[in-house]
Image: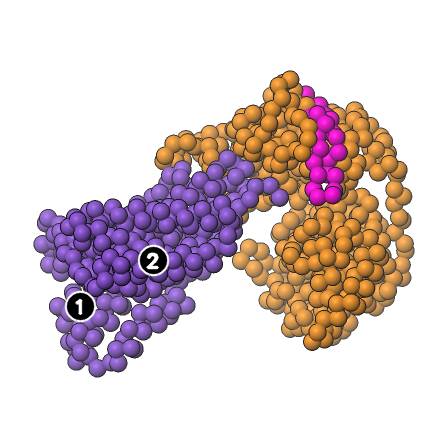
Chain colours: A orange, B purple
Amino acid sequence: MQVELQDIHKFFGPVKANAGISLQFEGSKVYGLLGENGAGKSTLMKILSGYQPADRGQIILDSKPTYFVSPANALTQGIGMVYQDPLDIPPLRVIDNYLLAKDKKLILNYQAAKKEMKDLLSKYNFDVDPDYLIESLSLGQRQQLELVRLLSGGAELLILDEPTTGISAEQKEVLFDSIRRLAYDEGKTVILVSHKLDEVQELCDYAYVLRQGKLVGGIKVPCPNERLVEMMFGQIPVREVRPDHELGKTVLELKNLSIETPRLTVQNINLEVKSGEVFGLAGLEGSGQKLLLQACAGLLRPSQGNLLLQDEEITNWSYHHRQQAGVAYLAAGRLEEGLVAGLSITEHIVLAQPKHDFLVDWRAARDITTERIKTYQIVGRPDSTADQLSGGNQQRLLFSLLNSPLKLLLLEHPTRGLDIRSTDWIWGLLNERRKDGTAILFMSADLDEVIERSDRIAVLSGGVMSRIVNAKETTVDELGHLIGGQA
Amino acid sequence: MITELLSLNVLIGIATSGIRLATPYLYAAIGETFGQRSGVLNLGVDGMMLLGAYAGFYVAFTTGNLWFGLLAAIIVGAVMGLAMAFISVNLQAEQGISGIGIYLFGLGMSDLLFQKTLGTVETVKGFRSISVPYLSDIPIIGEIFFQHNILVYGAFALVPLAWFVLNKTTLGLKIRAVGENTQAADSLGVSVSGVRYFTLTLGGILSGIAGASLSIALLNVFQVNLTNGLGFIAVALVYFGSWRPGGVLFGSLIFSLVNALQVWVQVLGIDIPSDIAVMMPYVLTILVLVFTVQRTRPPSALTKPFERGE
């Protein structure tokens, strides 16, 4: 199938998300769509998949102009998209979700559907049990389910939005194999929306680069990384070298800490994080890193063991007590756990102030807000609500809410979904904190990030912690082995 | 006196009226279950029931045909359901508030029509009991379960039917999907508005029947505020039953059995202040709710209007 986008425009209020983009896609090819956050990739792909209409411009399928009224309508014409957060219905079973809107008969035919689904799943080496509830699946499995559903719906062009964020290395291999197979054996078109250059280099035949809502150009890949970076940013950003730093006294100490949850038990964790140290936690999603961070923050009660903050026993301290003592926790779900969607930047800053009077001094609050917006380079107005901000700006807002000085900073995926520039900027901030003696304990799914940014690293695998390795002496391979549970 | 309560005849009586009294709760709560499973909280059930009860009674009273009365209740319920659907789907109104509006409209309108058309409390001969052949001859069991009128049987038949529709049919799957994630359901090609129109109209129809079951099958009268808040109990029963028809049945039975017990306590003249007796079912419901019901999550999209795109 030949797909052409002609002069696509899309505005959100005064923001030009897409400003006249024209692209072509052919069958039997894998395309990369690159661009930093806010470059307009997702908007463009949502238009192509029928999720939202363009304000101007045309979609042409096999030289016929067409128009999609909904994602389901786009699928009937052969275009399907797997979203970064899969659009499925968590409390339903896998098979229910697969059957939904597919089975037109009055009474559901589970037997036939299960067989059909199992065949498709095994064809692509996907590992999903049709009887499981979707909420019990990993992100990678939900993705596989979406792919299978779209394929059975007749998709000829598949769009994958940041598909490797949050899935395991093994699932990534399976995904890449199936993408190759779909393109080269079955003649389909695959578009990979990503900001991970390595993946685009590895998988794609051709890459389009967007910047600020416009097409910068297309390039055959593999090609030198510098070329892509230059297209994405207009210049090659200089990566800051991580400054060396004297470590101070122990800030956080875990002694034989165990955490029990219905799904996972984290056992006997012993570790120390020193003042000015960055300690990285690696491991597959759900191996216990998050539980560990939450226990340190006071959101989860350990079943056994002790937590010490600067030699003081804090095991039984509440979250708020620890906050006052200088512990901060930034969750990965920015809008779900960190920010209040409907509140403005100013209101967030007022709430985060360490002291509150009976009446809010809005004038003073506005001044502080303006200043924070400037220092933290947040793209937004003081009265913009949190859900109006882009992901990168939400993260900046979260960081601007942290009080100073902090003794201990706990971070869950601090740069997930952010582009290179925002990532560097965030780590610049963290390095500043480090100089002030803050101990930083963070988890990340990005092994390069863990190795590059940490002083020391521990890997969790099924709730068991590996030996602690020195970041300077380890490699991605070594961590990979530890993640797999090998010593 | 208390020992009188434990005699076999009284126990059978309590059980029999318990079954009878569960009827309006079942119709209304099963209807509400459909609405809530599709993500719409309809607090107007009681108002819809009142209009259904009035329409059913008035038509049955004037035509002398109970089936015409039932049909009138169904039509009035359907119209009210469509109104609720229009308000919550097209106008995207706040569901809690629009439901209260529907309730007050139903309460006032049924009162007004009653004053204008009937004026005084009249009675009709309601649906007669039908003894199920053979089964009704079984001692005790037969008397409790198989000597009721058609609307009572219908209410109990509705429970497995609703379970089947929700869990085994394409339509049911669509309803559940819409109630959990409207965006995802839409992207899969399910018409969110269509599904909600259907469930709310069905809910309206069942509310109408629930009202009619009071006015032409159980009490056989109509008066102002005949339902006495029964529709609100039905909404509570949906939560109580964790959005499952079986759970709703369980809740309805507990509630109606305690209600029947309370009535018998008063009939037998047992020396408990009547206010306290009347309070009993409610207190018990709260207690059961607190202690026995397993915690299930409500449908995620409950009370959330749907609009395509961002």
- Position of residue B200 in the picture relative to residue B307 (left or right): left
Give the quarter of the image for residue A433: bottom right
Please tell me which residue is depicted at 58% across the width and 45% down the height of the picture.
A138
Disc 2 designates what residue? B109
Nearer to me, B81 or A23:
B81
Front one among A127 and B60: B60
- Specify the quadrant that holds the C terminus of chain B: top right
Name the kind of residue labelled 1 in the image: Leu
- Frontmost of labels 2 and 1 is 2
CA–CA distance between discs 2 and 1? Answer: 39 Å
Q: Which residues are magenta?
A: A5-29
Q: Residue at x 86, y 64 (%)?
A: A436
* Residue B102 placement (x, y as % from top left): 40, 56
The picture places residue A473, in percent across and down from the top left corner, at: 83, 49
> Which of the two residues, A220 or B148, is positioned nearer the viewer here?
B148
Q: Chain of mark 1?
A: B
Task: Give the left or right position of residue A218, taking residue B48 as reference.
Answer: right
In this figure, what is the number of numbered marks?
2
Quadrant of the snapshot with the N terminus of chain B? bottom left
Q: Is residue A203 visible?
A: no
Asked if badge 2 and badge 1 are on a common chain, one would say yes
Side (left or right) of A219 relative to B210: right
Tag 1 secondary structure: helix
Name, please, the residue furthest toward the top: A63
Give the label on residue A372, or none. none
Residue highlighted by disc 1 = B11
Residue B240 picture location, percent across and down: 39, 60
Judged left or right of residue A91, residue B121 is left
Query: Visible in this render: residue A437?
Result: yes
Which residue lies at the image location 60% right of the left edge and 36% below the top edge? Answer: A51
